Amino acid sequence: MIDIREKLDAIGPYVPAPDDDMLVCRCEEVTKGEIRQAVHAGMLTIEEIRRFLRCGMGLCQGQTCGKLVKSIVARELHVSPLDIEPATSRAPMRPTEMRILARDGGEAHE
């Protein structure tokens, strides 16, 4: 198990960067600075950051921002991106019409 306080002391305090306003997750409008601040607040895994900031939970399900978020977290933690465990993948949720759910194996009545 990782000692969060020890890890936070090792990575040092959050220092704003000129590109912190860069949009990383377009679906949920999460910036690079928000991700960096989350790491320095003690969220050290992709899963924690995903649940806190919702990056990777939008329409693209992390297909657009996933690798970028992982590289930002790895850079802040001073580790290789290969050492960062990916977030749990889940099936994308799509709206379903009630008539489809109401079918009992027979033909749909419209």
Image: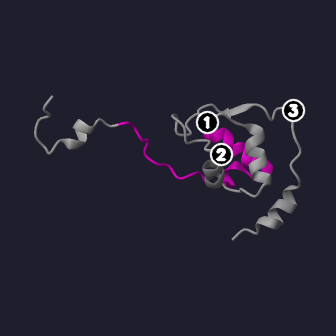
- Distance in Å between CA atoms under marks 2 and 3: 21 Å
Q: Are marks 2 and 3 in contact (CB under 8 Å)?
A: no
Q: Work out whether residue 97 can be spotted.
A: yes
What amino acid is labelled 1 in the image? Glu
Three-letter residue code for mark 3: Pro
Q: Residue 18 carries which label?
A: 3
**Residue 94: x and y, percent?**
39, 37
The amino acid sitting under disc 2 is Leu
Do labels 1 and 3 touch, CB within 8 Å?
A: no
Q: Which mark is residue 72?
A: none
Callout 1 crowding tier (Cα within 10 Å): few <14, some 14–19, many ≥20: some
Q: Which of marks 2 and 3 is nearer the N terminus?
A: 3
**Mark 1 = which residue?**
28
Sequence order check, earlier mark of 2 and 1 = 1
- In space, the residues marked 2 and 1 are separated at their CA atoms by 8 Å
Q: Name the residue under label 2.
A: 53
Residue 86 magenta: yes
Classify 10 Å Cα crowding around label 2: few (below 14), some (14-19), many (20 and above): some
What's the residue at 76%, 69% (across, down)? Answer: 3
Magenta range: 66-95
- Considering every residue shown, the one lying at the far top of the view is 110
Locate the C terminus by quadrant.
Answer: top left
In the image: residue 82, left or right of residue 14: left
Above or below, 99 against 45 in this view is above
Q: Is residue 32 left or right of residue 60?
A: right
82 within the magenta span = yes
On screen, residue 18 versus residue 101, left or right, reads right
Tell me whether the residue at label 2 lies in contact with that at label 1, contact meaning CB atoms closer than 8 angstroms: yes
- Quadrant of residue 7 within the rendered picture: bottom right
Separation of marks 1 and 3 at Cα, in angstroms:
21 Å
Report the front residue among 53 and 47.
53
Q: Where is residue 69 in the image (x, y as percent from the top left)?
A: 67, 42
